[in-house]
Amino acid sequence: TSDFTGVVVKTNERRFGETQTPVDVRQLYLELEDLGSLDIKAGRVWLHQAGGAWTDGLNVEHNFNKNWNAGLFVGLQPDPFDYLPTADRQTAGFYTEFSGDRLTHSLAYTHQLLEGELDRHFLFSRAHWNVPVSDFTKSLFLSYFASVDLPNSDIELENPIVTTLFTNASWWVSTHL
């Protein structure tokens, strides 16, 4: 149920088992772009570079050149179940991203607090590579998505552990023979 709208949602969806409603605001921010190599976003920001981390706060990104950037983010973390703002959850982190003609890659660290105590901190990495193969093959697309949770005494996690690992290989045949 959604306390905000009073609507009971029964259709399943991939994320959290409920269909999203119009009141689930994923992104809403102000962006300052004409600051030379800096981009600044303030508001609700979704960070694909950091594995879909969200912040109701600030993201500052520095563009080193057309292919490389790095950023820092800090703020409140929306509630993961109803997306409403909450002061109980805070998040901060940093990332770097390379985006070329056929390859994109990002690496990030995210630190999350719940009521002022460490809830989770993790590393995230993803890559997408579009590989030209031959005249008869349009391309081969390879990708991975991974997160590693770091030690956390609150949940008795003593060693880093891979919590997400997704790989994909897709091949397209050329339409020109």
Image: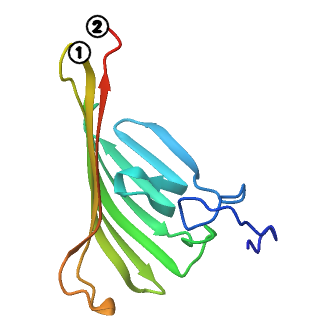
**In the image, what residue type sits under mark 2?**
Leu
Q: Secondary structure at mark 1?
A: loop
Residue at screen point 61% across, 70% down: 85
Residue of label 1:
136
Q: CA distance from mark 1 to mark 2?
A: 6 Å
Query: Does 161 sit above or below residue 164?
Result: below
92 left or right of 129?
right
Residue at image point 51% right, 55% down: 45
Circles 1, 2 touching at the beta carbon (< 8 Å): yes
Nearer to us in this view, 34 or 81: 81
Residue in the picture at 27% in, 85% down: 152
Q: Quadrant of residue 66?
A: top left
If you read the primary sequence from the N terminus, does the residue marked by circle 1 or circle 2 appear first?
A: 1
On the image, the x and y values in percent for residue 131 come to 21, 29
Three-letter residue code for mark 1:
Phe
Instruction: Please give the label number shown on residue 33.
Output: none
Label 2 sits on residue: 177
113 in relation to 14, above or below:
below
Q: Is residue 65 above or below residue 58?
A: above
